[in-house]
Amino acid sequence: MPTTPVQRGLATLGEAACRYREGAIRPEDLPMIAAEALAAGPDTPALRELAGLPRNAASDDVHDAFAQALAECGLPLPDPATARRHALRRLAVRLVDGPVDLAELTQEEWWETETGTAAERAFVELMPQCSCCLDYTLPSDLRTWTADLRAAARALTTAVPAAPGC
């Protein structure tokens, strides 16, 4: 858990990098994220440049500034597979923290996620493949399946992350 303002700002940037790569953050949102990270503590020329870009800046310019800001902060822009694995971990956290709608488990096709650890595989293997046929694909004992899914989610949230970042 980040303890200093700089560490919190870097954690914010790392999570933004994962979410950006998976398509959950649009380029026009990155300048505000950079401004918030800058206010938290990390300060680099590219981060200042990115924070100063308007929302309607060219996507390529925003992408390049973001990649440079991450590099100056010592953070990688993750590959899409790593970003997807981080998204899987965030889903597991939400599942541990409270109920998640069954439709959400199927809408992202989580079962197709390329895994790299036993904890990720165990979680993904329990994911339903299709929202249209949940009645046919879920086990008959829904309570046991739900408990197994939560246990796998808890194991994933306590396992070492796939890569630094979010």
Image (cartoon, helix red, strand yellow):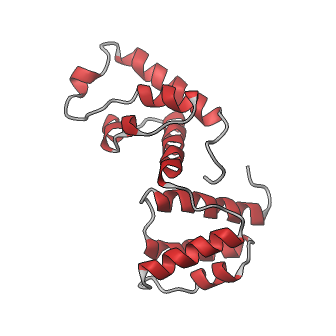
Side (left or right) of 17 relative to 132: right
Residue in the image at 58% along x and 86% along y:
52
Residue 88: image location, x then y, percent: 49, 42
The mark tally for this picture is 0
Side (left or right) of 14 relative to 150: right
Residue 146: image location, x then y, percent: 42, 23
Side (left or right) of 85 relative to 133: right
Most foreground residue, 79 or 110: 79
Toward the left, the furthest residue is 132
Residue in the image at 69% along x and 83% along y:
45
Most foreground residue, 126 or 145: 126
Q: Is residue 20 above or below residue 44?
A: above
Q: Is residue 24 visible?
A: yes
Side (left or right) of 13 relative to 23: right
Residue 20: image location, x then y, percent: 48, 62
Most foreground residue, 154 or 47: 47
Residue in the image at 51% along x and 37% along y:
92
Residue 38: image location, x then y, percent: 68, 75
Q: Is residue 154 visible?
A: no
Toward the right, the furthest residue is 4
Q: Is residue 134 above or below residue 57?
A: above
Most foreground residue, 41 or 120: 120
